[in-house]
Amino acid sequence: MATLYTHASQNIFKTWLLILVFSLLVIFLGWIFSYYWQSPAILIFATLFSILTASISYWGSDKIILATSHARLVTHEQNPDLYNIVENLSITAGLPAPKIYIIEDPAMNAFATGRNKENAMIVFTRGILNKLNKVELEGVAAHELSHIGNKDILLSGAVVVLVGLVSIASQMSLRMSFFGGRKRSDDNNNNQLGAILALISLIAAILAPIAATLLQLAISRKREFLADASGALLTRYPEGLASALEKISNDSNRLRFVNPSTAHLYIENPFKEKQKMSWFVKLFMTHPPAEERIKILREMSV
């Protein structure tokens, strides 16, 4: 039977597997274009780029996330009440107390990031601090600490970097395929091999961001259910997190500084789509429906 320990171990394995697969994908695309353009320099560049990407996704993803989210560090002296909540829950969870960051935004949301539990951080928006009571805020903090304890944060951070870089690389590939095809047509040097390679590169460039996004979504939805359950067990009061999710999901404010590559980090979908969705649309959601999460939490209270 799967446990929190096996989930944490799987997250470490998935992180390294994800980095390896994306690195090989970049090198493969580099080989296609180096062969097509008869330029070994392209393959060398792709290999170096994949190494750089892997390093950034492991060592620097949290810094990129904090910068793009416009989060600022808050000291214990600046907000002792919030630190006391997080520190007390950290002791209960057996985790080092993470640093706390705040996004000055009226929208209600929060997320955790970092490479491991020793350098983890929790980010709260100003809106969530102003609109939740202490019990609800404890539920949110426990949820994010569960992400840290379950080692979700390393995998989620790597996804942010890799999805963004692969999307950029695929757009460049599409442009190179287009202009490369035009050049060969103008020179009347088309051949069957060149056409096949151009087609492969075009398909790879189109499928790469789609595969990256699907992986991002698949990782996100499962981990949210587990963090909800772990957080509820940590506080021993599931209603606190359920009430917090209810308020967050009903909040009409939308985060100013958020993009699709970081959306899966947040405790609730930051884009606030409210329309009814079919099962097909739900496949592409970064989060499970809030109503479903709230229902499960309140069933835990019975």
Image: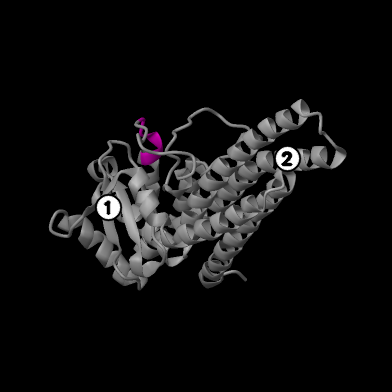
Residue 143, numbered label = none
Give the quadrant of the N terminus.
Answer: bottom right
The residue most toward the front is 187
Q: Amino acid at mark 2?
A: Ile
Mark 1 highlights which residue? 101
Taking the spot 44% from the left edge, 49% from the top edge, the residue there is 265
Give the quadrant of the C terminus.
Answer: bottom left
**Dominant secondary structure (helix, strand or loop) of the stretch shown in magenta:** helix
Mark 2, residues whose alpha carbon is within 10 Å: few (<14), some, or many (≥20)?
some
Mark closer to the chain start, 2 or 1:
1
Q: Position of residue 150 (x, y in %)?
A: 47, 65
Circle 2 SS class? helix
Per the rendered image, the range of residues in magenta is 248-252
Q: Position of residue 4 (x, y in %)?
A: 51, 68
- Residue 15 in sight from this viewpoint: yes
Taking the spot 52% from the left edge, 41% from the top edge, the residue there is 289
Q: Is residue 131 left or right of residue 204?
A: left
The residue most toward the right is 192
- Residue 239 in sight from this viewpoint: no
